[in-house]
Image (cartoon, helix red, strand yellow):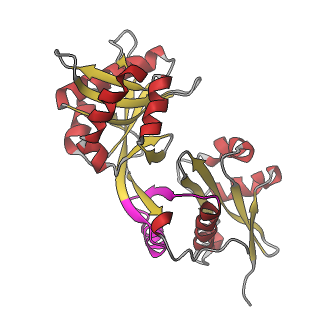
């Protein structure tokens, strides 16, 4: 007999089921418990669960809408007892259909380099791997030299810098933010310049020798580097200065999700950014919906 399941918005009373499912994610634990309430209240996309017949909730995932028609999929979890039944694939189809209905232009997700099951699943719906990232962490550096913060008056120079960036090309035109990846568009750069989230190391002639994007949420222990490029020595100096900026912001550490660019990883290592306890690589996949003519995903049961 065919199993029937329903995909629906999550409710506060689904927390016990979520905790049961997430207890099996990694030996070190899961982050979903920490963001569950935030995701429930979020207005930027649904938090979903899957109910299977009379069993109850057996899966969950979050869809997040980013600016400029970008959608990010995260937090896909399936109860170990119900894996291999096509639940994750049905959720992925639902998510893609939702993004299309909402006028989405592109859908992305990340998964571990070791997760071959997900690699095969996303390839079947046409998603392609566009970049990789590995986490490096540097402790905050109180009293150090802080980075130069750029503003809207620097927008032309910053735009020229990123247009010729090999690192941006290696990252598929993306930058990382809060464990997700987004396009480094003109609008995104303008917003970050307004917020003081673009920092630089200048050459003696005043030109930009290295540039990075950063972000820090008040009260968080981490300041994140979204992307960095430039002359290797200048990038190393900038990465060190960002550790000082993290200390000034009240963060305990600076974090960078670095692409597979050897000299960049070496520059950050020289600036005191070491591998974290989690030392795998995240692979980022995307599907551009304007090029996806099949539109096979259907929302529903």
In terms of depth relative to the viewer, which is nearer, 14 or 177?
A: 177
Residue 232 drawn above or below residue 260: above
Residue drawn at x 33%, y 29% is 156
The C terminus, quarter of image:
bottom right
Magenta residues, as a range?
Answer: 102-129
The N terminus, quarter of image:
bottom right
Residue 209 drawn above or below residue 142: below
Q: Is residue 106 one of those drawn in magenta?
A: yes
Residue drawn at x 18%, y 27% is 233
Lateral position of residue 197 relative to residue 24, left or right:
left
Q: Residue furthest top?
A: 143
Where does residue 239 sit, x and y in percent of width and height?
A: 31, 26
- Can residue 205 be seen in the rendering of this structure? yes
Lateral position of residue 90 relative to residue 70, left or right:
right
Q: Is residue 281 one of those drawn in magenta?
A: no
Residue 22 drawn above or below residue 51: above
Where does residue 274 sit, x and y in percent of width and height?
A: 32, 34
- Can residue 151 be seen in the rendering of this structure? no
Residue drawn at x 59%, y 23% is 219
Where does residue 80 sit, x and y in percent of width and height?
A: 61, 68
**Which quadrant holds residue 92?**
bottom right
Where does residue 149 sit, x and y in percent of width and height?
A: 38, 18
């Amino acid at each position: 007999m065919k199993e029937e399941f329903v995909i629906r918005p999550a409710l506060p009373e689904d927390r016990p089921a979520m905790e049961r499912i997430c207890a099996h994610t990694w030996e070190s634990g899961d982050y979903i418990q920490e963001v569950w309430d935030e995701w429930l209240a979020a207005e930027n996309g649904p938090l979903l669960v899957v109910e299977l017949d009379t069993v109850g909730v057996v899966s969950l995932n979050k869809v997040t809408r980013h600016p400029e028609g970008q959608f990010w999929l995260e937090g896909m979890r399936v109860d170990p007892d119900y894996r291999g039944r096509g639940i994750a694939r049905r959720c992925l189809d639902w998510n893609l259909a939702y993004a299309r209905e909402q006028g989405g232009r592109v859908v992305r997700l990340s998964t571990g380099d070791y997760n071959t099951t997900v690699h095969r699943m996303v390839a079947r719906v046409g998603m392609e791997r566009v970049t990789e990232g590995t986490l490096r962490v540097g402790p905050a550096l109180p009293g150090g030299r802080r980075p130069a913060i750029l503003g809207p008056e620097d927008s032309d120079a910053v735009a020229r810098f990123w247009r010729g960036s090999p690192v941006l090309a290696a990252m598929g035109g993306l930058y990382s933010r809060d464990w997700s990846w987004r396009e480094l568009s003109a609008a995104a750069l303008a917003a970050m310049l307004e917020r003081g989230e673009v920092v630089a190391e200048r050459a003696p002639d005043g030109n930009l020798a290295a540039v990075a994007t950063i972000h820090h949420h008040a009260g968080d222990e981490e300041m994140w580097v979204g992307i960095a490029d430039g002359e290797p020595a200048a990038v190393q100096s900038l990465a060190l200065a960002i550790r000082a900026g993290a200390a000034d912001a009240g963060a305990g550490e600076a974090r960078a999700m670095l692409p597979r660019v050897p000299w960049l990883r070496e520059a950050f290592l020289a600036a005191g950014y070491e591998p974290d306890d989690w030392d795998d690589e995240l692979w980022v996949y995307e599907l551009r919906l304007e090029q996806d003519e099949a539109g096979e995903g259907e929302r529903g049961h």
